[in-house]
Image (cartoon, grey):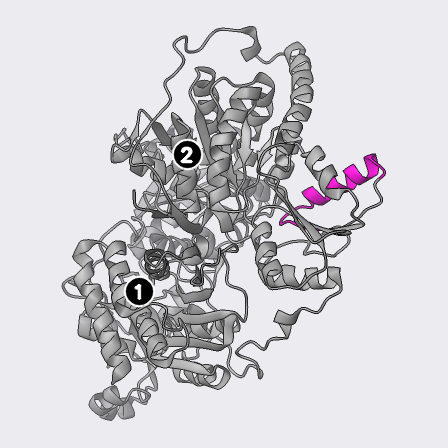
Amino acid sequence: MLNVLIAGVGGQGSVLASRILAQAALAKGWHVRTAETIGMAQRGGSVLGHVRMGNDGEQVHAPLVSRGTADCIIALEPGEGLRALEYLSATGLMVVPTTGIPSIMTNLAGSEYDVAAILQELRRRAANVAVIDAQSIVEQVGNPKVLNVAMLAAAVHLSNVRGCGLRGCITLSELEEALAASVKPRFLELNKQACAAAVASCDS
Amino acid sequence: MPKKLLMGNAAFAHAALAAGVRVVAGYPGTPSSELVETVAALHASGAAQDVHVEWSTNEKAALELLAGASMAGARCLFTCKQVGLNVASDPLMSLNYVGIKGGLVLFVADDPGPISSQTEQDTRRFASFAKVPVLDPSSPEEGFEMMGYAFELSERHGTPVIIRPTTRINHASAFFDVPDSYQARALPPEGFQRDSKWIIFPRRAYQAHGEINERLPRMAQEFSETPFNPCERTGDGAVRGIVAGGVSTAYVRDALSSMELPAYRFLHVGTPYPFPTAAVRDFLNGLDEVIVFEELDHVLEDELLKLAGAQHLDVRVHGKLDGTTLARGENSTEDCRARLASFFGVEDAAAAAAAAGEGGTAVEPPVRPPVLCAGCPHRGSFYAVKKALHKQPAVLCGDIGCYTLGNAKPLDAIDTCLCMGAGLTMAQGFHVAEPGRKCVAFIGDSTFFASGLTGVANAVYNQHDVTFVVLDNSTTAMTGSQPHPGTGATLMGGQSAPLDIEAVLSALGVGLVVKANAFDVDEAVSAAATAIDFAGPSAVIFTGPCIQLVRPDASVTVDEQACTGCSACIKALGCPAMSMTSVQGDPDEAQDAAPDEQVRNVARVMRVDASLCTGCRLCTSTCPFGAIKKGGAPCSTCS
């Protein structure tokens, strides 16, 4: 069983990211279930997408990942990665971008959003943390909306390189095929560029 | 036929179409809305032939429309969220007595948690209250099977049938094989046939009550023989049993897969009312103890206790009532596992396995509640009303929709929220009780038509001095941008003349009705002040489209030389595109700007996230130093 969480802020595209992963799982013949946050929380609040894949031929029953069992958390925002940390297994992989989205509450309290402290806390508490320079990837591609796919590609690539997270079960080319089946044709090239930039960023 | 990844609600839509549903109507509400949207999309693409689909004005209107279509012989599907059934309860209670002709299924989504709702009410209870059968799927796949069965059941017994999934079924996705197109079942050639049974009179009601009382045990017996109440038996001589309903069944199944337990039986109850007594009696045979996992109310637990009592069974039933399982909120695999371990007297090995993130918390993630979007017109409306009221004592009644978020700081513009349409009438109650206060009620455009009109009429009739603030963003925003009578767009693809809120208010006799652009602060404050000062019922309509519907304008820019870091803008509006940023903290910036900032001694400035800002320009008026300026050309990637 592969348990994956996508942690972000409403509007970042966590639902699409979970659908792409599910599509990749289907192509491999795995049983898969996803659960998404829809409704009030989508209005700029915390959102958590669950993807559960029966990669060893298992049936997936519960749509939700249990705490302490996520093989991989794909954070689209550092603070949301930290919030989801309780779901990560002891050996799980957390991929997290460097770019934070400030919260209104932080602003109103007169304080500043300290992304560096969040990243440091993640590194302290989780064994496998990969910090992705998402800002430069997004700038390279020229569209902030591809962050979700870039982080997905980083998670797949690092899982394969490090042998943790998704444990090498999904290849980059399988991810790209799932991408082609999940996004509108006119956005495919843009998203492929995001994948390539994310992989290059991980390797640099 | 390639498999398609379908959200539970979309799968339910396909299942209903496969069952030949002809008329689909409902009112949006999370987590139910995507069913009607899926039918509408399939109809629009030509894949759902001879189907009528609509967003009705509210749930009561939807169910009454379907009652008519069903009496003519059409298979009908009603959709709403749990609190929507409260609105439709009047027709439902009587409809069960009157009966149906074409199969009538009510798809009512419950919301344990609650995640997006006012209550944790349990539609299974509503079903037994209304004496209507209810099916409770444990997965989208089972729900898919139940939908076809529900239509047959409805027609066979002449009863409405409820299917009540919960959020984790509605919004869970799985892969389905579905056909490319559907054809609605034809009406019977005779159509509607006049009959005295269609008219509810006390004498007929007495007779119908007898028919209901007779058919419920027949359905209970039938349920015992369906595949929807499967029992798994592990090992011999089991003395302990597990009962689960809804998604808790999936949690229990996952928990069991990671546990070593002595012999047990596991019953999933997919047809909670009328209770499948025969199947459950068979399950209980020889058991000493049973643990029940269900969300919301202790419906299965009550039925088990009733059965044990009626049949003098020596079995102890554990669940919500004795504190063995969670009394409220959602269940989960880990919670079920821990409680099962305790029930069976074994160790919860998985809990012992250390999760990541042990070792204490030094840094907490930022608190991140849902907020009004950057560029939301409601922000300007709330800001204007607060400015217009200034320091006058007032009570601000809110309602259901995105604008409930107006309660959050810094807008802090909502004092109450009860149910759909309640704000308008609650404000009148405040005025009666405390005439010294200004009583203002906010209502969205969709809610206005769904359940606001009677409140307006009441204020005019009884002459309550209140001000209605209609937040007209031309959509039903919170549930995902559904059209409504004020937009005129219909799910059948046609465009009717939009109902004019201003004309409706005037026609209902509201003494003063003013209209203002929500993004124009001066105009909006002046309109609000005029309405609030008016003696008698008054209304102000703030217009401005939901930002989800329109192309954003260019982001505003901040003149960092002029910004003093006072954060007046953030404290006034709380727009999520704004944040305070250290000037020295940014090495790139420090090189360019350091000399000036040292002179001005500004440590932080307000910066705008151009990817979030929609250029509504509301903030430009809040800066005492004129540092926020209108942006240039619209962003090319966003347009």
Q: What residue is rendered at 47% in x and 44% in y?
A: B141
Bounds of the magenta segment: B291-312
Above or below, comparing residue B150 to residue B1 in the picture: above
Residue B115 vs residue A25, the one in the foreground: A25
Mark 1 crowdedness (10 Å alpha carbons): few <14, some 14-19, many ≥20:
many
Residue B609 visible at all = no
The answer to whether residue B308 is magenta is: yes
Residue B511's mark? 2
Give the quarter of the image for residue B222.
top right
Amino acid residing under circle 1: Cys
In this view, the mark in front (2 or 1): 1
Where's residue B575, x and y in %? 36, 64
Where's residue A60, x and y in %? 49, 56
In the displayed structure image, the side of residue B328 where residue B164 appears, left or right: left
Above or below, comparing residue B590 to residue B112 in the picture: below
The C terminus of chain A, quarter of image: bottom left
Q: Mark 1 points at which residue?
A: B619
The answer to whether residue B225 is magenta is: no
